[in-house]
Amino acid sequence: MILFLILGLLVGALAIIFTFQNIATITVVFLVWQFEGSLALIIVLAIVAGMIMGMFLLMPEALRKRFQISKLKDRNVELKDELTVTKAEVISEKGKVAANNAYLDNLEKNPKA
């Protein structure tokens, strides 16, 4: 926990140093818009814009995987239910087989001639 606090303070200090060293005002022109701001602010905005675009590009795949996981969880529940029913049927059939074996053993011991 203390390590994350130290790392956070270090990154914050580096960000402040970066900001103070890049206070020159620059103009960015994009199509018909024109932006003026410090170099540090423009760089940070460009990084944030890139992160947002990356998130939008990754979102369809993440949603597809979430949907697939949901379907697989539902299928897993169905299969568990089916397994429970099948186990009950197997136990029932084992009981029938045991009863038939007991009947056959009884016939072998006491044949009716």
Image: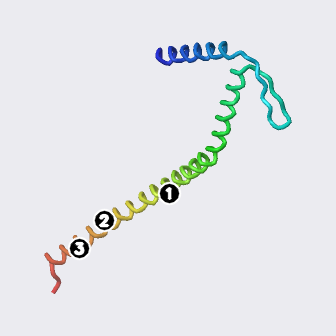
Which one is closest to the eye, mark 3 or mark 1? 1
Question: Between disc 3 and disc 1, whose residue precedes?
Answer: 1
CA–CA distance in space, label 2 to label 1: 26 Å
Which one is closest to the eye, mark 2 or mark 1? 1
Q: Residue at x 78, y 29 (%)?
A: 28
Disc 1, SS? helix
Front one among 107 and 87: 87
Instruction: Assess disc 2: are there few (<14), some (14-19) or many (≥20) residues with their C-alpha within 10 Å of its C-alpha.
Output: few
Q: Residue at x 55, y 13 (%)?
A: 9
Residue type pointed to by label 2: Gly
Whether 84 is drawn above or below 1: the answer is below
Which residue in the protein does label 3 denote? 103
Question: Between disc 3 and disc 2, whose residue precedes?
Answer: 2
Disc 3, SS? helix
Asked if labels 2 and 3 touch by Cβ distance under 8 angstroms, the answer is: no
Q: Position of residue 40 (x, y in %)?
A: 68, 21
Which one is closest to the eye, mark 3 or mark 2? 2
The C terminus lies in quadrant = bottom left
Which residue in the protein does label 2 denote? 95
State the residue lying farthest toward the right. Answer: 32
Front one among 96 and 4: 4
Left or right: residue 3 versus residue 27 is left
Instruction: Return the mark for residue 78.
Output: 1
Q: Using the rendered view, name the quadrant where residue 46 is placed.
A: top right
Q: Position of residue 87 (x, y in %)?
A: 37, 60
Q: Residue at x 56, y 18 (%)?
A: 11
Left or right: residue 43 versus residue 36 is left
